[in-house]
Image (cartoon, grey):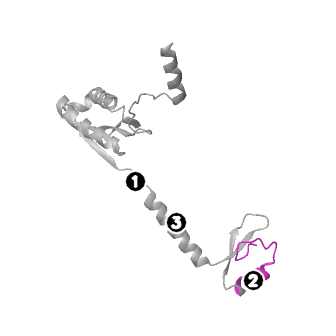
Amino acid sequence: MIGADGENVGLVPIKEALEIASKAELDLVEVSPNAKPPVCRVMDFGKFLYERAKKDREAKKAQTKVEMKEIRLRPKTNEHHRSFKVRDARRWLESGMKVKVTIRFRGREMDYPEIALEDLKEIVLELSDVGDIEQGPQMDGRTMLVVLGPTKGGPVKKKEKQPESGEKAEAVSETKK
């Protein structure tokens, strides 16, 4: 049993533990029922529930929701219109959103899914620097889709490595020789 002030009281019979809790005007709560012997604690259970709910609310606020954006195309969408949509998808991926690229088939376009697959591969290749494939190309009824997510490290901008002070001194001394 753990007392009201947090110290370990030791092995105590249930009746005695209940008396200790009632004298302190607190509750006896079983903290770890699977332990041998079970561990109980004297505490204000209402306050405990309130604190736990408060922590859950704070965790929920800190949690980020990933928004899913979608660009819709057709197999006959020309290069110019596709570039506008890819530019939007790039902006969304850079801001941390997921992008679903959908190509919708109409009529006899269903007979040529390889055209749409080629378009999807080109789009994925264009966005490969800011996005990774989360769900590969697949058919879903009359649509073919692929889901892209932002890269884990974000957009990588290459920086030239600055020499450290010791390296700089060595480089300067070598050039003077």
Residue 89 falls in image quadrant:
top left
The residue wearing badge 2 is 20
Q: Secondary structure at mark 2?
A: helix
Does any portion of residue 141 appear in the rendered image? no
Q: Residue furthest front?
A: 176
Q: Which of pointers 1 and 3 lies earlier in the amino acid sequence?
A: 3
Q: Which of pointers 1 and 2 lies earlier in the amino acid sequence?
A: 2
Inter-mark Cα distance, 2 to 3:
29 Å
Inter-mark Cα distance, 1 to 2:
46 Å
The residue wearing badge 3 is 55
Q: Residues within 10 Å of mark 3 (few under 14, many from 20)?
A: few
Give how far across and how far down residue 70 sits, in percent.
Answer: 29, 44
Q: Tell me which amino acid carries mark 3.
A: Lys
Q: Residues within 10 Å of mark 1 (few under 14, many from 20)?
A: few
Q: Secondary structure at mark 1?
A: loop
Q: Tell me which amino acid carries mark 2.
A: Ile
The residue wearing badge 1 is 65
Q: Residues within 10 Å of mark 2 (few under 14, many from 20)?
A: some
